[in-house]
Amino acid sequence: MIDRRTFLKGSLATGALAASGTGLACGEAPVGPPDDGWQAGDVLHLLPTANHERILLKASFARARDEAPLLSVGRERVAGLPSDSTGHFYRFDVRGLAPETTYSLRLLEPGGGPICDAWPLRTFPAPDTTPERFRVLAFTCAGGPEDLYNLGFFNAYLPHALRQRLFARALSFSPDAAIANGDHVYWDLKSKFGWAMGRSPRAWWVAGLFDRALPVLGTPNESVLKKAFGPQIAGLYGVRFRSLPTFFLQDDHDYGENDEASDELRTFPADDFMLDLARSTQRLYYPELLADQTLPASRVRSDGLSESYGFVRYGRLFEALLYDCRRDFRNARDPATQARDSGFVPPDVEAWLLERCARSDALHLAQMPSTPVLWTAGKWGEWYPDALAERDGEKQLRADADKPWWDPGWNAQHDRLLSATASRSDRIPLFVSGDLHAIAAGTIHASNGRALDSPLVSLLTGPVGTGALGWPSKFRGTVPQPSGTVDAEETIAPLEENGFSLIDFTPAEMRVSFFRWTPDRPASEIDALEPFETLVLPRPGA
C-alpha cells in the first residue's frame, strides 16, 4: 500500500517535460551507460529492420529539416520520406540489396555532408540457405513514462538509465536481431487507470491531452503524441540499436488502452482513434514488418510492409511468425461489435499461420503472438477463461469462473494454433511471447483434454521496463499461473523480475538463455549479468 504522503512526494518531485519537436526534453541526450564514441550529430534515434534484400530505417532529428536527408547505403543514396508534419521524423527504405552482406550506412545532408558517423548493418541470409547459427534478443514491456507515474521507491516503471543498462548488456552478446514484443508505450486513456495516466492532470502538464475527434498526425494531437510517446521510444532506444535489425510487435497499451471489459466499457476492438494512435506511433518511431508473398494480400500495404503481421526469416535455419492479437480482435459474444466469429486474429491470418506451420521448410519455427500461451493472470483479453474467484475463503485463478465478456472462441482459436504448431515431428513446437511482465518457461502436453502431437514449449521472454507497481501480483492481485485449460509443466515458474532472453538456433538445437535483475541489487551488476538459467533443446531428428 502507498500512503498519501509518499504519493504526493513522488509526484511532486518530478519536473515537467520540456517540449521539443521529437518529444525529448530540450538539449537532453538519452541517459545510459557510456557509449562507444559514435558521433550521432543531431540524430536522436535510429531503429532499423532488415531481411535478406531490404533495409527499413526510422530516424528522428533534433533539428527540423526543410529538405529530406539522405541515407547512404554502400554506393546508393536514398532520400528520406517525411513521417511527421514538422520535418523531425523520416523513414528510409532501401531495396534490392545482396543477402548476408554488411553495408556501411550513413545519414547525409541534401548537399552530401555527413550528419553523423557511419555504421554497419548486415542483411539476413537468403531464404534457401542454411546458416550455422542465429541469435535473437527477445524482450517485452520496455515502455513506460518516467515523469508521469513516479512514486519514489514505488515506481510503475523502471528508470530509463536502468533499462538502457539492461539493453547495453543484452547488446554486448552480439545478437543478430531483436524482437520487442508489445507494450512499447503506456499512456492509457479510457480504461480505469486513465485517471492516473493519459487523461490525468499530470499528463496534461507533461504532454497535453489527446482530442479523440481529431486525427493524430497533422493536428495538435501530433505534439501530444511526440511528448507522451517520444521519451518512451526515441528517448529509450536512442541510437543503440542502429546496427541490429529490430522487429516491433504491438499489444494493447500501444493502442492507448489496457485490455478491460465491463458492462460500461470494453476497450477492444480498437476504435478509430486507437487504430490511428497505434499506426501513427509505428509510422514515426519503429519499423513496420517486412512482408512477403505468403502473407494475405489484404494485410500487405502497397509499399510491401505490414503493420501487424509478419515474419523473421533467417535462411532455412529459423522462421518466426509475428502477430498482433489486438489489431483485428473480434468478440462474437459482444453484440456491440457485430462480430459473427471470434478470434484474436482474423480468419485469413489464422489460415496463414496454419499454412506456415504445415509448409515452412525452416528447421526451427516459432509462433510469436502478442498475447502469451500457457499462462494467465486473469486478464479479460487472454486466450484463457481463468479469472480470480473465491475458493476456500481466498481468491484464486479458476478456469470455471465467469469471466465477463470473455469469448470461448478465443480459446478455440488457441487450440487450433497449438495443434498446428505441434503437428510437425521434425522441429521443436515453440511459442515465444511477452506481455505478462514475467520470465518463464514451460511445456504444454494437452489443451482442453486433447493431447498435442508433440510437447509444445512456451517462453515468456522477460520485461525490461516494469517497475514495482506494474507486476501482475500488484496490478492484478496474482502472479501468472498456468491456465486450468492446459496440461502443462513449468520449467521456470513465472518470475516477476526485469530481464531479457537470448535464443540461439543451430541446425542441431535451440538454446535459451534467461537473464534477470531486480532493483534491490546494485545497478553495476547489470553490466556483468550472466544467464541464471539456460535451456538446451535438441531439434528432433537432427
Image (tube, helix red, strand yellow):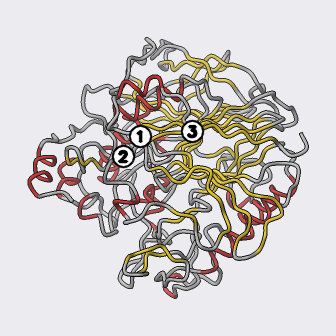
Cα distance in 3D space between marks 1 and 2:
6 Å
Residue type marked 1: Ile
* Element marked by disc 1: helix
Circle 1 residue:
233
Please identify the quadrant where the C terminus is shown.
Answer: top right
Amino acid type indicated by mark 2: Phe
User: Callout 1: few (<14), some (14-19), or many (20+) C-alpha neighbours within 10 Å?
Assistant: many
How far from the left and from the top, in percent, is residue 480?
Answer: 49, 61
Residue 123 image offset from top left, x and y in percent: 71, 28
Q: Which numbered circle lies on residue 514?
A: 3
Q: Is residue 121 left or right of residue 262?
A: right
| Residue in the foreground of this view, choosing between 349 and 433 | 433
Q: Residues within 10 Å of mark 3 (few under 14, many from 20)?
A: many
Q: Position of residue 336 (x, y in %)?
A: 48, 85
**518 or 263, which lies in front?**
518
In the rendered view, tell whether residue 78 sits above or below residue 117. below
Which label lies toward us, 3 or 1?
3
Q: CA distance from mark 3 to mark 2?
A: 28 Å
Residue that label 2 marks: 229
